[in-house]
Amino acid sequence: MKILVAVKRVVDFNVKVRVKPDGTGVETANVKMSMNPFDEIAVEEAVRLKEAGAAIEIIAVSCGPAACQETLRTALAIGADRAILVESSEELQPLAVSKILKSVVEREKPNLVILGKQAIDDDCNQTGQMLAALLGWAQATFASKVKLSPEKAEVTREVDGGLETDSVKLPAVITTDLRLNEPRYVTLPNIMKAKKKALETLKPDALGVDVSPRLQTLKVTEPPKRKAGAKVPDAKTLVEKLRNEAKVL
Ligand code: AMP
């Protein structure tokens, strides 16, 4: 079984994101970039499946600028076997990424594609679903547990009422939720080993994919600043304030 994992390079989750002064987007120059956290979980899951003997090869794919090579090297250090960068300096929206991934899937013929449930920069939560639709494959989103057998995957999902377990026929697309696993710490020897693993670079044109944007961002603004809080001396004053000012009681 071959597993393809999609990894996106995003602004690191610890960085306080700043909006560009002209409101066209967020600052990414001189900002720490990392692998999207849900994609780290996706790579970790693929590696665990391989370690358990359920998969033989893991291919990590990233779409974006040349710097995505770093993200792919991290995926290789976690345990992916080889990597593909689909290089483009254009803004790649989820539909374009889905089309690129579809074309890579047709080339590589994996039995399973694992993606993050969402990228923390655009919060779209679209790519996995659109990829499954384009391929005509089954999909199981927001996985918190995956059990793989040669013909199917059993996927547990956290839903409002508890846990839902679905069975999907392979080939399928799975997207990861936060509690699926805790990604391993990347060790120095594995970072060194990752440098020697194969990383192929392709262009969307060579894959026959039109990546032109379908959606225009009109503006990006900072969230409104929170008003300063006030300290109250005791519970009685708090209740009075809530009654008179917030009118909640
Ligand atoms: P989104 O639909 O943008 O929230 O992204 C969902 C998932 O799709 C991510 O967690 C990644 O696994 C994958 N993905 C999105 N954009 C890219 C990209 N540029 N390169 C590789 N994978 C991506």
Image: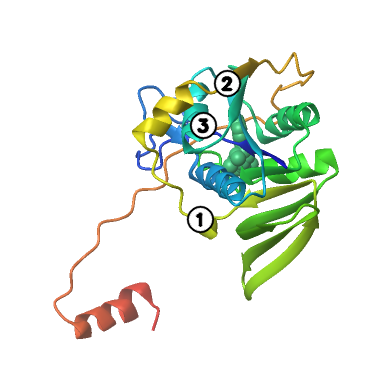
Question: Most extreme residue toward the front, as rendered?
Answer: 53
Q: Residues within 10 Å of mark 3 (few under 14, many from 20)?
A: many
Disc nearer the start of the sequence (2/1): 1
Disc 2, SS: loop
**Which of the marked residues, 2 or 3, is nearer the chain's N terminus?**
3
Residue 181 is tagged as 1
Answer yes or no: is residue 21 visible: no
Which three-letter amino acid code belongs to the residue tagged 3?
A: Leu
Earlier residue among tags 3 and 1: 3
Quarter location, residue 84: top right
Secondary structure under the numbered disc 3 in the rendered image: helix
Within-10-Å neighbours for mark 2: few <14, some 14–19, many 20+: some
Q: Which one is nearer the viewer's eye here, 197 or 122?
A: 197
Residue at x 45% of width, y 31% of height: 26
- Count how many numbered circles sit on residues in the image: 3
Q: Secondary structure at mark 1?
A: loop
Q: In the figure, residue 50 lies in which quadrant?
A: top right
Q: Which of the two residues, 91 or 97, is positioned nearer the viewer here?
A: 97
Classify mark 3 as within 8 Å of ligand 1 or not, answering yes or no.
no
**Residue pointed to by mark 3:** 76
Quadrant in which the N terminus is drawn: top right
Pointer 2: what residue?
A: 198
Q: Is residue 162 above or below residue 45?
A: below
- Which of discs 2 and 1 lies nearer the camera? The answer is 2
Between 180 and 64, the residue placed more toward the observer is: 180
Does any portion of residue 195 appear in the rendered image?
Answer: yes
Labels 3, 1: front one: 3
Q: Is residue 8 above or below residue 212?
A: below
Q: Residue at x 40, y 79 (%)?
A: 248
Q: Amino acid at mark 1?
A: Asn
On screen, residue 19 above or below 154? above
